[in-house]
Amino acid sequence: MVDVILGLQWGDEGKGKIVDYFAPRYDVVARFQGGPNAGHTLYVNGEKMVLHQIPSGIFHQNTINIIGNGVVLDPVTLKKECDKVAAMGIEVKKNLFISERTNIIVPTHRALDKASEMQKGDSKIGSTLKGIGPAYMDKTGRNAIRVGDLLDKGFISQYIKLRLKHQKLLDNFNFNEDITAWEEEFFEALEFLRTLNVVNGEYFINNKISEGKKVLAEGAQGSMLDIDFGTFPFVTSSNTISAGVCTGLGVSPKQINEVLGVTKAYCTRVGSGPFPTELDDATGEELRKIGSEFGATTGRPRRCGWIDLVALRYACMINGVTQVVMTKADVLDAFEDLKVCTAYKIDGKETEEVPFQMSRLKIEPIHKNFKGWNIDTTKISEAAKLPAQMSSYIDFINGYIGAPVKFVSNGPGREQIVSL
């Protein structure tokens, strides 16, 4: 069976730590979508490590890690990441496997991403400029180069054909930057990629399931960035929800078991797009400061606000969430008063549903007030010792979103998770 861990907000929910926490219980950890625009932060022996492409189970020596076909892979990012992980004493090539159907990000994808974003001006999406969108466009346009193609003698001609296609598009954008250095780095990274374990991913993972192995599917970004169900057009280019596990790994829906959704105790968003509960004031700045809310991939300051239960219930619904993990609860330790959004007011009418096009509407969040707990919770390890105000806060959320909060993360360390 396959369990799933994914984000329920706009990404940055702390999924990396949560996957790392659960990984010892599984034989396989598999990334099923996204690319190097995802940054999963882990603390290993007190040392901070941000993973962009490698599954977060890599630091557990007995865990197999697979990059699935739903991912778009940047060989340069992967090589740099493998070098960092290897420097920490991990045998990367032993436990890292890559599906041959995984699509590759080429240098001109990055150029197209940058050129397209520059042309949008004030309407820009807030892309990380890693080439994700153009890579997925080539996938759906049936032009992509996949990892398995690297082993084919016709690879170079395939690459040249794709580059020429991209160059015509770049000419239309009047994009004249020299990407020669990008290409040199790219081809060097391809040689490294060829030395890794490239497998027929769908057979590989289904054989593991048939052998009774436990598989954990790791998502990137968050549900509100899903290409279909997120805050379009301010979304990512892949399906970030649990349904994406099946197409991103090649497993059938009947294999999906538990779906663990990860949410912060408050809410953040990087880049452009609607954010109904955003706090553009001193409280929002305090959340950002205490929570160190800066993008793991871009370093950009994250927009901060109170938890949005309308969006959270929506995310639980479309994912079929069975358990919720609440992260960064300790960030709220310093606040005397807390709020949660329980409804939206749109054109004078209240609703508890996420509207079709948030970006076209003026949404006023309707809040419920809570008293804060105002004590340091970072050293608490038992549910019974959590402050009553925190328990009340969590109980209300449980009742509203229709899925139980089963774990609370109260610090960045591996051990800082309380089971409820």
Image (cartoon, rainbow, N blue to C red):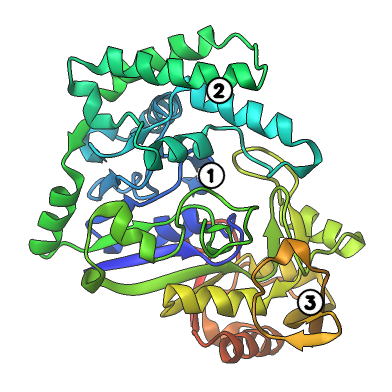
For the residues labelled 1 and 2, the Cα–Cα distance comes to 29 Å
Residue plotted at (43% across, 29% down): 105
Q: Are marks 1 and 3 in contact (CB under 8 Å)?
A: no
Q: Nearer the viewer, residue 305 or 123?
A: 123
Circle 1: residue type = Gly
Sequence-first tag of 1 and 2: 1
How would you rate the neighbour count of disc 1 (Cα within 10 Å): few for under 14, some for 14-19, many for 20 or more? many
Residue plotted at (30% across, 46% down): 68
For the residues labelled 1 and 3, the Cα–Cα distance comes to 30 Å
Foreground: disc 1 or disc 3 = 1
- Quadrant occupied by the N terminus: bottom left
Q: Position of residue 360 (x, y in %)?
A: 76, 63
Q: Nearer the viewer, residue 31 or 225?
A: 225
Q: Can see residue 199?
A: yes
Residue with the mark numbered 3:
374
Q: Quadrant of residue 379?
A: bottom right
Number of marks drawn: 3
Circle 3: residue type = Asn
Sequence-first tag of 1 and 3: 1
Residue with the mark numbered 2:
169
* As drawn, 125 above or below 205: above
Residue with the mark numbered 1:
39
Foreground: disc 1 or disc 2 = 2
Mark 1 secondary-structure assignment: loop
For the residues labelled 2 and 3, the Cα–Cα distance comes to 55 Å
Mark 2 secondary-structure assignment: helix
Q: Nearer the viewer, residue 198 or 248?
A: 248
Foreground: disc 2 or disc 3 = 2
Q: Position of residue 308 (x, y in %)?
A: 69, 74
